[in-house]
Image (cartoon, rainbow, N blue to C red):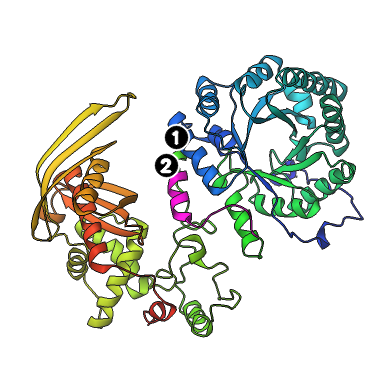
Amino acid sequence: MLKHPASKYRAFPPIGLKDRTWPDAQIIQAPMWLSTDLRDGNQALIEPMDVARKLRMFEMLVRIGFKEIEVGFPAASQVEWDFVRQLIEEDRIPPDVTIQVMTPAREELIARTIDAVRGARRAIVHVYNAVAPVWRKVVFGMQVPEVMALVQQHIGLVRRLTDARPETEWRLQYSPETFSLAELEVSLQACETAVAAWGAGRPMILNLPTTVEAATPNIFADQIEWMARHFAERPEIVLSVHPHNDRGTGTAAAEMALLAGAQRIEGCLFGNGERTGNLDIVNVALNMYVQGIAPGLDFSDIDAIRAEVEYCNQLPVPERHPYAGDLVYTSFSGSHQDAIKKAFAIRRPEDFWEIPYLPIDPKDLGRSYEAVIRVNSQSGKGGMAYLLEAEYGLQLPRRLQIEFSQAVQIAMDVAGKELAAADLWCIFRGEYGLDETPLLQNRQLLSRTRADGRPEMELRGTMLWQGQTRPVHGLGNGPVDAFVNALGAAIGRSIRVMDYHEHAIGGSGTVGGDARAAAYVELRVDGGPQIFGVGVEHDILSAAIRAVTSGVMRAERLQPAEPEHADMLSAVV
């Protein structure tokens, strides 16, 4: 008789913690957070970050409010080493931030890792070794006593090397890797061995990872409570967790671990990491936020953070990603829209937040209410994007679709009938000023190298702006950046590009019947709301310049203010 394919798997056994207390516990304060974007997140990228992108990520993590940041694996590559040294030698680490560096339990790598952080005010040395049965038997060929001897030997080495550098305040972090798959007694023995080798009473972090998530999150909570009981009377020891997301339950595992006694969480912004990713710290932090707990991390401009993470990781954040996706605050359903409308109509500013289908106030994350209630494809929005691409070759970014759909809805309300592709094109041209945007004349573009070796572009030209011909001149790291700086200086405005998309438009049957390029720029003018500009031209640079100019002109023309609830609700049909 043939067995079912599922029979080759074994269920993870229960812990048998009959007197567990975590189900009745409550999270009442934020944990300590560690970002491992620059280490665990970075090692999972198709193209790992270079030093410049690493520095941008580090500076953003500091702005968000992380006080512990795992900055890399300095013994792994020269890039990792150089980045850690740059942080220290250029004094880029704020006094209240502690960096963490990781090393496997190997003597030569431990020595190089500790040498990499010489001169730092404070540092956490993170040492790990796998302890689960499959790793012991198959990967390393070790018995449990040999594993414990390895832990004692290498943690002892860390102690001797760090004691020799008293100018730095050191902490040890020990991770029994594959903890979630190991026997609890073996994990406990490894942790106790590490504590003894480091020195009883010295500050230390025990980090318990779900290296590969293999059980339901309640089992992980039982594992954490079992371990926490053995270290409850050791105030110098911080119990940390490092969940992964192989089963899609990383957030639940982290929250249940906090209920079970964990004090610290490691993870990445938006869940980047190996396989299905590390724990998403944004998700857990904002889950606490909507429970009335201040997480100590600032996500009040979630779109800017997402854009920076997407740039550094070269990976997109999905549109349905919790709290940060483009569509997570949008209701297409008529019944959902009606419930939201009624709740906003009676809400007072001093009330608790109780709005149907909106677990968090979008304004708290830097979003507006404009996209909360919006038409769907049956009301014209879905077909709008399809027709503009099919008939005119325009591939509108998702957030531009959201913005333009409001203009389409107004036109549909006035017309009272379905709008054809030609009608949509007419609305689009008028909304984004494709026929009105002034051209940059007498354009000169020079490329040169700055003193620090980085390339720089210089742009000069003239432009007719509000009836006056104005000279424009600017510098930037590329031609578009140079034009943004030039235009801002010429008209006395602060222009910040938030996002940029471009694509070629094919030949016959498209805009103008010949090959062209389209550019879409999402920007802010003088710190105002984000707004799109669009440019269509014969080359991509001209299209980008048109797009920037279009966005600035729209910002000046519309001067949108944050809509009141009544304004937002008036758009509901």
- Alpha carbons under labels 1 and 2: distance apart: 8 Å
How many labels were placed on the picture? Answer: 2
Amino acid type shown at disc 1? Arg
Q: Which portion, as a residue range, is magenta?
A: 294-309
Vertically, is 29 above or below 416? above
At which x and y percent is residue 48?
48, 31
Quadrant of the drawing holding the C terminus? bottom left
Q: Amino acid at mark 2?
A: Tyr
Q: Position of residue 466 (x, y in %)?
A: 12, 61
Residue positioned most to the top? 108
Q: Which mark is residue 311?
A: 2
Residue lying at 65% horizontally and 52% vertically, measured from the top left: 251
Taking the view exactly as shown, the residue that stands out farthest to the right is: 19
Q: Does the segment drawn in magenta span residue 304?
A: yes
Dot 2: few (<14), some (14–19), or many (≥20) neighbours within 10 Å?
A: some
In percent of width and height, residue 348 lies at 54, 81
- Secondary structure under the numbered disc 1 in the rendered image: helix
Whether label 1 touches label 2, CB < 8 Å = yes
| Residue 254 in view in this figure | yes
Give me the residue at 46% from left, 56% from top. Answer: 319
Q: Name the quadrant containing residue 380.
A: bottom left
Q: Nearer the viewer, residue 518 or 494?
A: 494
Q: From what the image shows, is residue 51 above or below residue 428?
A: above
Q: Position of residue 301 (x, y in %)?
A: 47, 56
Crowdedness near tag 1: few (<14), some (14–19) or many (≥20) residues, C-alpha within 10 Å? some
- In the foreground, 246 or 196: 196
Q: Indicate left or right for 163 with 397 as reference.
A: right
Residue wearing tag 1: 53
Query: Which one is in front in this view, the residue at disc 1 or the one at disc 2?
Result: 1
Quadrant of res 191:
top right
